[in-house]
């Protein structure tokens, strides 16, 4: 099968020491990307210009957060194949994240085994597209493959909402090189970092589900909720990806905060977390 037209950049370095950033400067685990983000055309749903090449219509930031359990509309891109629940993630809840340290788009080295207190939302995805670069042949026919950009935009739009209901941090993760991911993070103005696992080390440690496309082994889309190093909950399969952030938000709203923890906004100020009646 032909590879990606135009070629993907060479594989980036793999895991690095926990006390060192990918560029060799001191780093630390956890955290989200910061600093002023460039005001550029993001090219994605919710950005300045809808990026309709991915099959998901552009949309504005939601005016309100749907209540937990509310019925949602059908897939945003009718006709895309729904991924089956093949049991590939059934073994994950209750397990612990390994002590891997991965390079992040914000320049840090993130230790998965030392994420810190509170809940972490870890979104694993296969392959994000890039303007001017084709996706692997047959991408749209692979169940669950399409929609990585739309999913990232949804988590961007819901980021403050997720933090308000107890997500201490949010990360994306894929097997793409860090520089390739950094272009995505800057273009979409993501408020969270993306972790690069070019060697599929997390797959080896946790037996994560993968698939092959364009001659490359890629992660299947799933999201893990990690609480004090333990995988508390897993969303798998994920479909449709553009509605997944709201699905995670609904789940978090029904949970009690971890003992001794309270939610904070991105500046670190404590938040009052409203809970729906049970």
Image (cartoon, helix red, strand yellow):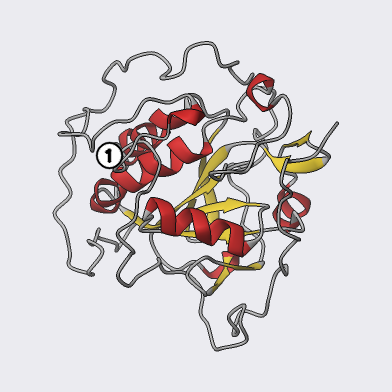
The quadrant in which the N terminus is found is top right
Residue at the image position 49 percent from the left and 29 percent from the top: 53
Residue at the image position 71 percent from the left and 49 percent from the top: 206
Residue 229 visible here: no
- In the image, residue 30 sits, relative to residue 150, either above or below, namely below
| Along the line of sight, the residue nearer the viewer: 17 or 14 | 14
Quarter residue 74 falls in: top left
| Left or right position of 242 against 165 | right
| Left or right position of 167 against 55 | left
| Left or right position of 9 against 151 | right
| Left or right position of 226 against 117 | right
Dot 1 falls on a residue whose secondary structure is: helix
Where residue 213 appears, x then y in whole percent?
77, 34
Badge count: 1
Residue at the image position 16 percent from the left and 58 percent from the top: 271
- In the image, residue 160 sits, relative to residue 265, either above or below, namely above
Where residue 61 appears, x then y in whole percent?
23, 38
User: Hey, which residue is sitting farthest bottom in the picture?
Assistant: 25
Where residue 216 appears, x then y in whole percent?
80, 43
Where residue 256 appears, x then y in whole percent?
29, 46
| Along the line of sight, the residue nearer the viewer: 263 or 42 | 42
Q: Which residue has dot 1 on it?
A: 253
Classify mark 1: residues with Cα within 10 Å, few (<14), some (14-19) or many (20+): many
Residue 2 visible here: yes
| Along the line of sight, the residue nearer the viewer: 151 or 42 | 42
The quadrant in which the C terminus is found is top left
């Amino acid at each position: 099968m032909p590879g990606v037209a135009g070629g993907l950049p060479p594989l980036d370095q793999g895991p690095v020491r926990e006390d060192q950033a990918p560029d060799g400067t001191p780093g630390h685990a956890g955290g989200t990307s910061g600093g002023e983000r460039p005001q550029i055309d993001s090219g994605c749903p919710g950005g300045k210009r809808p990026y309709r090449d991915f099959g998901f219509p552009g949309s504005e930031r939601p005016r309100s957060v749907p209540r937990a359990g509310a019925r949602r509309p059908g897939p945003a891109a009718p006709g895309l194949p729904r991924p089956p629940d093949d049991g590939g993630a059934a073994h994950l809840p209750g397990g612990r994240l390994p002590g891997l340290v991965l390079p992040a788009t914000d320049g840090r080295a993130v230790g998965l085994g030392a994420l810190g207190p509170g809940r972490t939302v870890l979104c694993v995805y296969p392959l994000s597209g890039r303007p001017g670069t084709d996706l692997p042949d047959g991408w749209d026919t692979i169940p669950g493959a399409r929609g990585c950009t739309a999913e990232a935009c949804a988590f961007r739009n819901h980021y403050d909402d997720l933090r308000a209901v107890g997500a201490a941090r949010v990360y994306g993760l894929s097997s793409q090189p860090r520089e390739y991911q950094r272009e995505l993070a800057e273009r979409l103005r993501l408020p969270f970092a993306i972790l690069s696992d070019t060697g599929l080390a997390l797959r080896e440690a946790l037996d994560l589900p993968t698939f092959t496309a364009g001659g490359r082994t890629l992660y299947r889309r799933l999201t893990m909720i990690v609480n004090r190093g333990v995988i508390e909950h897993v969303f798998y399969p994920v479909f449709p990806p553009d509605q997944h952030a709201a699905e995670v938000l609904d789940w978090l709203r029904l949970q009690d905060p971890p003992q001794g923890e309270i939610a904070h906004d991105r500046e670190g100020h404590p938040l009052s977390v409203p809970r729906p009646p049970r």
